[in-house]
Image (tube, grey):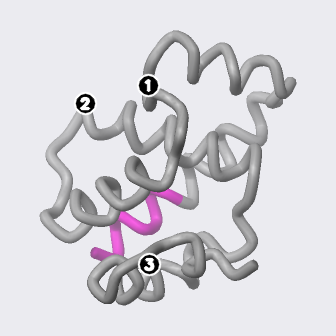
Amino acid sequence: MEFYEYFIGDEALALAKEFKKYFKGFKGKRMKILILILQEDGKLRPLERQFKEFYKVMQDFCDWSIGSRQAINDVKKEHIREEEFEEIRTLLNSVYANL
C-alpha cells in the first residue's frame, strides 16, 4: 500500500500525495516514530498551516494516542534505536525547510 493510500477524502489525499516524496515507504514503526516526532515538534515550534493540516490527517489515521505515555511506550517496545529516531527527525527537518 502506498503512503498516501492510508488517507481518505480529496483534501487529505491531495495533501498526503504532496508529502509522499518525503515519507515514501514509511510504515509501521517508522510511521509511529514520525508521528511521535511531529507531536514533539508541534509543541516546540509553530507549524506552517499546511503542515498542521497534514498532521491532523496523520492524527486521524492513527488509532493510538499521539504523544501520550502509551504511544511512547509503544515505540519503546519496538526497540527503536536512537539512530532511527534521529534519521527520521533529520528528514522531518528537511521537510520543514522546504515548506
Q: In the figure, residue 71 lies in which quadrant?
A: top right
Residue 69, horizontal then vertical, whole percent: 51, 10
Residue on which the image places disc 1: 67
Q: Is residue 6 above or below residue 87?
A: below
Q: Label for residue 43?
A: 2
Image quadrant in which the C terminus is located: bottom left
Q: Position of residue 87 (x, y in %)?
A: 68, 49
Q: Which residue is mark 3?
A: 16
Tag 1–tag 2 contact (CB < 8 Å): yes
70 magenta-colored: no
Q: Start and end of the magenta stretch? A: 92-99
Q: Position of residue 13 (x, y in %)?
A: 41, 84
Residue at figure coordinates x 47%, y 87% from the top left = 17
Query: Image check: 27 left or right of 19?
Result: right
Mark closest to the chain's N terminus, 1 or 3: 3
- How many marks overall? 3
